[in-house]
Structures are given as structure tokens and as C-alpha cells.
Image (cartoon, grey):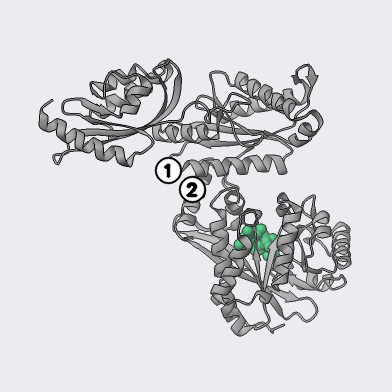
């Protein structure tokens, strides 16, 4: 290598090392295949020298035999000019002969003629520890994300299954924490056995485990899940003790790579939560609710999710009037979110809210909704000075630190009066600690903000929440009033809920009022407000303002 080239290589290398603090870097002059590597890498992995000719082959010798083929292929593609970089994960042998998990990202830098000139990259050493769960010995959540990204990079198809155990804390209470760990360990082993040679297993947060299979189809994975579920509920022993576990499972088919790992994980968590909360552990495969097309569903969620990051592009609010039951004058309105794009048209909230609620991004959308509703609310107030603006909250928002401050800040910023705001919470908020929830509700009420309990009676914990939380209004779900004029069950439900709410000094709002007959029929109950298509569907702000309601 001539001196000029060496000086250039060193100059670049030095600059590069500064920015890549904490990782090993390498820089290869591809025209002569001479590289310089970080001294720390040379020491740690026992490489011959900081300067190496044909470093690719030397490094390949340090890569775990099982990962070598992928690496070799990738380097070939880079040196032949077909690839312009790589992003991969492999195990590399240290000077003591142990393997550590590394991620390696490299890019080809071309000369002005477009010929490959330098290959520059950074190797991150993840060590052994945090990537391996010390209870089960499985790779961890971090490993899962890294592998997923590598998979996307290679454009491999896969089926991803998440399993988890219901009521595990009870087992911990009964048998103790150590034995609880033994159960997880055993389950991890069983999972690995079931997917030997067909899937990689990971331990996620809590009791959840994930399998990524690139060779099985969703039907085959479902069969194994069912077998596993059956086995651990009837025929599962830990240290001679018979243990019965009830599993839940969610599955996502990944055959589309214009999506991010975060989207996949949100879809997976959503499918899992459906299995756990609604399907008693039956496997739920993530799919589009209308077309049942998995690929399209993930693609759509991915686009919507990306739009949240881009200043909530494409989201807008519709407003549905809420009427006083006695005078049928306008009491207020409920803000209901929509998302629209040229490709997908208008997408209703039940197609994206439940999935995005599983996403760390959700609070951002929630904040946008609150701000938009308050901003629009100012215009509503000009026409209807006493109106109450109802905004739906999700537990994912309440859970976030600083949520109360955020709401108060937004009220100040938009100059929307707190007394005209009503926050709708559902019993899913019960996932939060009840004491924390109670404190939050009390603080909001101290500021004059109203609280409504939405979808009352649709879950298991409604009564519990009503007992614990001082709410202003209970909203009866449409499910219970659809056939109220004919169905005794509906009538009993409405009577029961309205009496119950009355006992807790809460008002009642009935949703889904579609006809005049229904509205008249409901007057016999202790109902204070009505909402439904009979009065109006949810409409955008301008359309709402163009309608004439008698102010309440
Ligand atoms: P929800 O809060 O129970 O909202 C009432 C839903 O019932 C709305 O559906 C509304 O359009 C629909 N509805 C109202 N009156 C009638 C009627 O007379 N007949 C029928 N068939 N339906 C009626 P939408 O707008 O599709 O919203 C669905 C759900 O999505 C909401 O249920 C709520 O859980 C969630 N959601 C909507 N907007 C937001 C939001 O801004 N934030 C959060 N966290 N969730 C939202
Ligand atoms: Ca609502
Ligand atoms: Ca509702």
C-alpha cells in the first residue's frame, strides 16, 4: 500500500473512530483490500494486526460456523459491487475462544466514478449477558428486535408467534418466585423442543415468549401452539409437581418488508391481547377485520403508524352530538378520530386504535386528539357556550408519566375551559393501578374536568371501577340497547345500569340511539343524555356547525 493511500486511510479512520465511540470500527480501502481495525477489536478478538490485508477472510474465521455462510455471502456481494452495505448479526469468537453476539453495519463509499472505494463499518459487541435471559437461557427482547431487523434486511418471510401465561402471578404467589422461574425455564425448554430446527425462541417481558419461524407456515405454527397449549394445561410437570398453565397466543405473518419492526411488534401484541382478553387463549392471527388479509392489514397499520410520527398526518376528528334526554337540546359532543389517505380511504378507529394502543407511539396520537378537540372546541363554544366536549382516552395515555400535566398544559395553550371538557375512560384503564387511577380522576375533577365511564358493562370490571372512581357519567354501550324496545334482556340491562349509576350519583348516557321510537322508549329509565344516529352521525367540525341544534 503506498504512503498516500495509508495516510488517507488513517485520516478517515481517525475521524470515523471518534463518531463511533463505544463500538469497534473498520475501514477498508477496497482498491487494494487493506483495512484498518480498532485496536480494541484487535485485542478483544485476537486479530493479527490493526492493519490487515484481506481482513474479510481473517474476520470470517472468527465468525461462528453457523453464521459464516450469511457473512460470506454478504461480503461477496459487497466486493462484487452488487450490495452497497450490510447490516447483520452474528456470533464472533473472542481471543479466549468464547462467542459474543455482534451486530455489524457497514457501507460502501464510492469514488466519483461510482466504483467502490472504501468499505466502512462499525461492529457492536452485545456481549453475552443482556442478550440471553438468565432464567430460560433464551435470547431476550433485544435479541428479538435485532434478529427481526436482520430478517427484514435479508427480506426473509416469517411467522411470528407470541405466547404467554394467564394468571402467572398467582403461581408465583402459591409456589414462590424461584419455582415460578423454574416453570418459565421448563416452558422455554418445551417451546424450544417443539420448534427444534424450525424456529428461534425468545423470552420477552413478563412471562411472554416468542418464536420466529422461517420454515413453517401459519397453519403449522398454529398446530404446534395448540399442541403446546394442550400439553401444558394437562401434562406439564416441574420438579415432579403437576402444574397447569393456561396459555394465550398471538401470531403475525410477515411477508412484507415495507414495514418496521415496531409495527410488527404492535400487531403481535395486539393479536396476543385479543387471545388473552377475548378468546380464552385461542390463537389469534393478526389480520384485517374486513378483508382478512394479513399482509394488507400490517401494511395499513404501518402506514398509519408512520403517519403518527409525521405530525399525525391524515388524522382528523369527527363530532357526534350528545343530547339532553328530557329537552332534546344539545348537551355537547363526542370527538371521534378518523384517518384518511388516498390509498386507503377513510379508516374507522376500531381498525387502528386497538393496535396502536399497544404501541409506544400512542400517547403522541392521544395528545394530538386532545389538542385538536380543544382547538375545535373553542369554535363550538362560540355557538354553544355550555357545551361539553367529550374526548376518549386510552389506558396507554393515562399510563404515561406526566399525563395530567399534559392535559392541563393543553387547556392553557388552547384556552379551552376545563369545565367544558369530559374525559371518557373505559374499564381497560383498570390495567393501571386503581389507586393511581383514583388519584388521577380526583385531580382532574378538582380542576373541573368531567369524567365519563365508557362502554359500561362490556367487560368484567365495570362495577369495580364504578365503586372506586367518582365519575360524572356512565355511558351504556350500544350493544345493550340495540333491541331495547323488544328485548327483555336489553330492558333489564338498561334499568339495572341506570339504577346502579344513580346509586353512585352518576348520570347515564345511552349510545346508539337510532330511531325516534327508541329514544321515546328510553325515557322511562333514569337516563340523562342520548347519543346516536337518530340525532346525527359523527361529522366534521364544519358540518356540525352548519346544523342547528337548540342549545341545552
Ligand atoms: P365509542 O367511544 O364507544 O364511540 C361510539 C361509537 O359508536 C362511534 O364509533 C360512533 O360512530 C358509533 N355510534 C354512535 N351512534 C351510533 C348509532 O346510532 N348506531 C351505530 N351503529 N353506531 C353509533 P366510531 O367513531 O367508529 O368509534 C369506535 C370506537 O373507537 C370508539 O367507541 C372508541 O372506543 C374508539 N375511538 C374513537 N375515537 C377515539 C379517540 O379519539 N381516542 C380513543 N382512545 N379511542 C377512540
Ligand atoms: Ca366514547
Ligand atoms: Ca361507547
Badge 1 density bin: few <14, some 14–19, many ≥20, Cα 10 Å:
few
Which residue was labeled with disc 1? Answer: 258
Ligand 2 visible in quadrant = bottom right
Q: Residue at x 89, y 66 (%)?
A: 503
User: Is 515 situated left or right of 303 in this image?
Assistant: right
Q: Position of residue 212 (x, y in %)?
A: 54, 29
| Label 2 secondary element | helix
Q: Which image quadrant: the N terminus?
A: top left
Q: Quadrant of the C terminus?
A: bottom right
Q: Are marks 1 and 2 in contact (CB under 8 Å)?
A: yes
Residue 151 in view of the camera: yes
Look at the picture and state if 351 lies above or below 191.
below
Q: Quadrant of residue 33?
A: top left
Q: Earlier in the sequence, mark 1 or mark 2?
A: 1
Q: Position of residue 309 (x, y in %)?
A: 47, 55
Q: Residue 394: which disc?
A: none
Q: Would you name the residue on which mark 2 appears?
A: 302
Q: Secondary structure at mark 1?
A: loop
Amino acid at each position: 500500500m503506498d504512503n498516500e493511500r495509508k495516510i488517507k486511510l488513517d485520516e478517515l479512520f481517525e475521524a470515523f473512530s471518534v463518531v463511533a465511540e463505544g463500538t469497534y470500527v473498520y475501514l477498508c480501502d477496497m482498491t487494494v483490500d487493506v483495512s484498518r481495525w480498532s485496536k480494541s477489536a484487535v485485542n478483544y478478538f485476537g486479530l493479527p494486526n490493526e492493519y490487515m490485508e484481506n481482513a474479510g477472510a481473517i474476520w470470517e474465521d472468527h465468525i461462528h460456523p453457523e453464521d459464516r455462510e450469511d457473512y460470506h455471502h454478504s461480503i461477496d456481494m459487497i466486493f462484487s459491487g452488487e450490495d452497497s452495505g450490510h447490516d447483520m448479526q452474528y456470533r464472533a469468537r473472542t481471543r479466549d475462544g468464547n462467542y459474543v453476539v455482534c451486530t455489524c453495519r457497514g457501507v460502501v463509499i464510492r469514488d466519483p466514478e461510482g466504483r467502490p472505494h472504501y468499505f466502512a463499518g462499525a461492529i457492536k459487541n452485545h456481549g453475552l449477558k443482556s442478550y440471553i435471559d438468565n432464567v430460560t437461557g433464551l435470547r431476550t427482547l433485544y435479541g428479538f428486535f435485532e434478529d427481526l431487523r436482520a430478517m427484514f434486511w435479508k427480506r426473509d418471510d416469517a411467522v411470528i408467534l407470541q405466547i404467554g401465561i394467564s394468571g402467572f402471578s398467582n403461581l408465583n404467589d402459591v409456589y414462590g418466585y424461584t419455582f415460578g422461574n423454574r416453570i418459565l425455564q421448563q416452558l422455554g425448554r418445551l417451546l424450544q423442543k417443539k420448534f427444534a430446527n424450525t424456529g428461534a425462541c425468545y423470552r420477552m417481558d413478563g412471562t411472554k415468549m416468542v418464536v420466529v419461524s422461517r420454515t413453517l407456515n401459519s397453519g403449522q405454527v398454529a398446530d404446534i401452539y395448540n399442541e403446546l397449549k394442550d400439553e401444558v394445561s394437562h401434562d406439564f410437570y416441574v420438579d415432579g409437581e403437576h402444574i397447569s398453565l393456561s396459555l394465550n397466543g398471538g401470531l403475525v405473518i410477515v411477508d412484507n418488508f415495507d414495514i418496521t419492526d415496531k409495527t410488527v411488534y404492535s400487531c403481535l401484541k395486539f393479536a396476543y391481547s385479543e387471545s388473552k382478553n377475548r378468546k380464552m387463549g385461542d390463537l389469534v392471527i393478526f389480520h384485517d377485520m374486513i378483508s382478512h388479509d394479513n399482509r394488507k392489514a400490517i401494511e395499513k397499520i404501518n402506514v398509519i403508524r408512520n403517519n403518527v410520527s409525521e405530525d399525525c398526518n391524515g388524522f382528523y376528528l369527527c363530532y357526534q352530538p350528545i343530547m339532553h334526554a328530557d329537552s332534546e337540546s344539545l348537551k355537547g359532543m363526542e370527538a371521534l378520530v378518523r384517518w384518511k389517505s388516498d390509498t386507503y380511504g377513510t379508516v374507522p378507529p376500531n381498525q387502528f386504535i386497538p393496535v396502536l394502543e399497544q404501541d409506544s407511539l400512542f400517547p403522541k396520537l392521544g395528545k394530538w386528539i386532545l389538542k385538536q378537540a380543544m382547538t375545535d372546541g373553542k369554535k363550538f363554544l362560540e355557538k354553544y357556550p355550555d357545551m361539553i366536549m367529550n374526548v376518549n382516552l386510552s389506558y396507554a395515555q393515562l399510563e404515561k408519566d406526566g399525563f395530567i400535566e399534559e392535559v392541563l398544559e393543553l387547556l392553557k395553550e388552547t384556552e379551552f375551559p376545563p369545565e367544558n371538557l369530559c374525559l371518557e375512560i373505559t374499564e381497560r384503564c383498570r390495567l393501571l393501578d386503581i389507586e393511581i387511577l383514583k388519584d388521577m380522576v380526583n385531580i382532574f375533577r378538582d380542576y373541573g374536568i368531567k369524567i365519563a365511564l365508557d362502554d359500561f358493562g362490556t367487560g368484567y370490571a365495570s362495577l369495580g371501577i364504578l365503586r372506586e372512581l367518582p365519575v360524572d357519567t356512565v355511558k351504556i354501550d350500544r350493544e345493550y340497547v340495540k333491541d331495547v324496545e323488544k328485548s327483555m334482556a336489553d330492558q333489564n340491562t338498561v334499568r339495572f345500569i341506570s339504577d346502579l349509576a344513580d346509586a353512585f350519583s352518576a348520570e347515564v348516557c345511552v349510545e346508539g340511539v337510532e330511531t325516534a321510537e327508541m329514544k321515546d322508549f328510553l325515557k322511562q329509565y333514569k337516563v340523562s343524555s342520548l347519543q346516536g344516529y337518530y340525532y346525527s352521525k359523527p361529522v366534521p367540525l364544519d358540518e356540525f356547525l352548519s346544523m342547528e341544534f337548540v342549545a341545552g
